[in-house]
Image (tube, grey):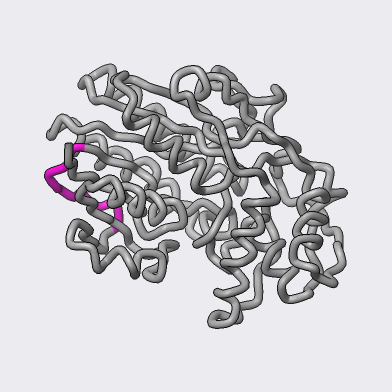
Amino acid sequence: MVKTVLVTGGAGFLGSHLCERLLGRGHRVICLDNFQTGCPDNITTLRNNPAFSLFRQDVVETYSFKVDEIFNLASPASPPRYQLDPIHTLKTSVLGSINGLELARRQGAKILQASTSEVYGDPVMHPQPEHYWGNVNSFGPRACYDEGKRAAETLFFDYHHSHGVDIRVARIFNTYGPRMSVDDGRVVSNFIVQALRSEDITIYGAGTQTRSFCYVDDLIEGFLRLMDHPSAELGPINLGNPVEFTMLELAELVIELTGSSSRIVHMPLPIDDPRQRRPDIGKARALLNWEPQVALAKGLSRTIAYFDRVLVDRPIRVKESIL
């Protein structure tokens, strides 16, 4: 069945990959993006497809399309980007969710919220299952994003319980791959760019803090399985790679794969930087038959090849890494 699918934030890192997969399934895709963090280059090839439509608009403003499904991905995702305008970041999560949910309510469409592992804050339960409520600072420098995503989850479940909206909530753990921005400040892209330029690789603290890294293709597959599931209230569900790495291990692997002469240097930890992050994906395995397939070394090799091409045309000095 051919569907009309709206992807907010469709020109972003994740959104562009999702649009590509949806078009590959034969669906009509509407991409809504204000290009605050999305990039026109991410969707250049898609714009030649007659089933693809692009609308430049901010999700905090109301919009109306005739759609069957909505993927609500619009939001800056890296700390340097979402901290530039924290009030707008919070509005994007709250007003953007309301506008998407209202459209879904009016049209009887299914809607998926791209939530985040940041709702767990600096967790004291490890790994993090969906029933864990988190340990979040409600007024720290990351709160505009963390609390905005938590509020969005509340809105999704309230719209389901009050209006019967068919919702799905995915909690995304660290994801990487081609089309990440060169200068967005996330750890994988920063380490790769610094290594390719033979610059010092910046690690905050001793490098013992941990993350799990999911390749973008695996995450998009999780999105699609979540949306395709017959349940009308599905989530929250963790989507991420349960294999855990320290920041020092990640930096050493990037140096090895790039053959770089970069040195590792250490800087003080930023405020509210989580010490550990790893998803419990038992729910995704059981309900979606989903788990990541791409090992970190393989995914990093693909991502390194992408940045090696991009840096030839965009010689921008990378910002300091923030996890």
Identify which residue is drawn at 19% across, 33% down: 109
Name the spot of residue 140 as percent of width and height, x first.
62, 44
Can you tell which quarter of the image residue 235 is in? Answer: top left
Q: Position of residue 62 (x, y in %)?
A: 20, 49
Q: How many marks?
A: 0
Q: Is residue 252 left or right of residue 276?
A: right
**Residue 179 x, y percent position in the rendering:** 50, 62
282 or 114, nearer to the observer: 282
Quadrant location of residue 114?
Answer: top left
Is-magenta flag for residue 63? yes
Relative to residue 319, is residue 96 depicted above or below? above
Q: Residue at x 57, y 36 (%)?
A: 292
Instruction: Tell me the residue at 26%/66% (across/down).
Output: 47
The answer to whether residue 119 is above or below residue 184 is: above
Above or below for 305 versus 131: below
Residue bounds of the magenta highlight: 58-68
Q: Nearer the viewer, residue 79 or 52?
A: 52
Is-magenta flag for residue 108? no
On screen, residue 93 versus residue 144, left or right, reads left
Residue 39: x %, y % from top left: 41, 67
